[in-house]
Image (spheres, rainbow, N blue to C red):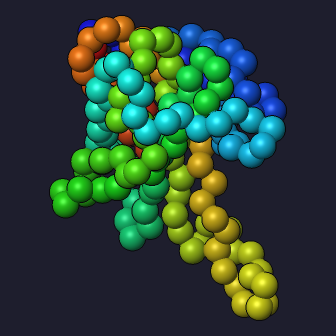
Amino acid sequence: MATNLARLVIVGGLFVALLSACSPSPSSTVVTPSLDAATPSPLPSVLSQGSSLTVSGRVADACIPPPESCAYWVTVVAQGGETARAEFAFDADHTSLTPGPGLPASLQPGRYALVFEVAVISDAVSPIPVPVGTPGSASPQPETACTSTLEVSDAPTVSVVVTFSRTDCVVVTRP
């Protein structure tokens, strides 16, 4: 069982490099994989003869104190550049996170990048005019909290647990 933190570099929507790091950098990079025609297709929801994928999370320290809130996402990036993204939903305890739809149920053997993002959700963050001219808030702008490399072998299940603390996170994977 090892924790592996890394920084994902995406250029023009394509997975280019994964640079290892000992700990998350204090400066965050916004990663928004694009699924337009110029980029590879999304990962299929179920891949044949692969390892079952389980992703869960928890919030140790919210990115902003209540009453404002935070939103959390996970993106899986395959070596070919295919991506799958899901927003985490809070469980009843408001500290446990479960990913919503969008992630594959299984992964074929290989190397994958996992990108975990966080965004502040607040009406006070960045008021901007909306089309009818009334003030509104900007859409949340996710920032990368951390990234990790996931090595999938022939194990029947792969488990990923992420713990968010403010705008950083730690990832633990188990085959």
Q: Nearer the viewer, residue 162 or 37?
A: 37
Q: How many marks?
A: 0
Q: Is residue 117 above or below residue 69?
A: above
Task: Examine the rendered structure and indicate whether residue 133 appears above or below residue 53.
Answer: below
Q: Can you see residue 60? A: no
164 left or right of 29 in image: left
Across and down, in percent, residue 172 comes to 32, 21
Residue beneath the point at 72% across and 90% down: 134
Can residue 45 be seen from the camera position used here?
A: yes
Q: Tell me residue 115's x, y (percent).
A: 52, 32
Q: Looking at the rendering, which quadrant does residue 16 occupy?
A: top right
Residue 40 sits in quarter: top right
Q: Residue furthest left?
A: 93
Q: In this rendering, is residue 32 above or below 91?
A: above
Q: Residue 91 occupies which quadrant of the picture?
A: bottom left
Q: Residue 36 in the image: x percent, y percent? A: 74, 46
Task: Name the quadrant of the N terminus.
Answer: top left
Q: Is residue 86 left or right of residue 153?
A: right
Q: Position of residue 37 (x, y in %)?
A: 78, 43
Q: Nearer the viewer, residue 34 or 30?
A: 34
The C terminus - image quarter: top left
Residue at 69 percent of width and 74 percent of height: 127
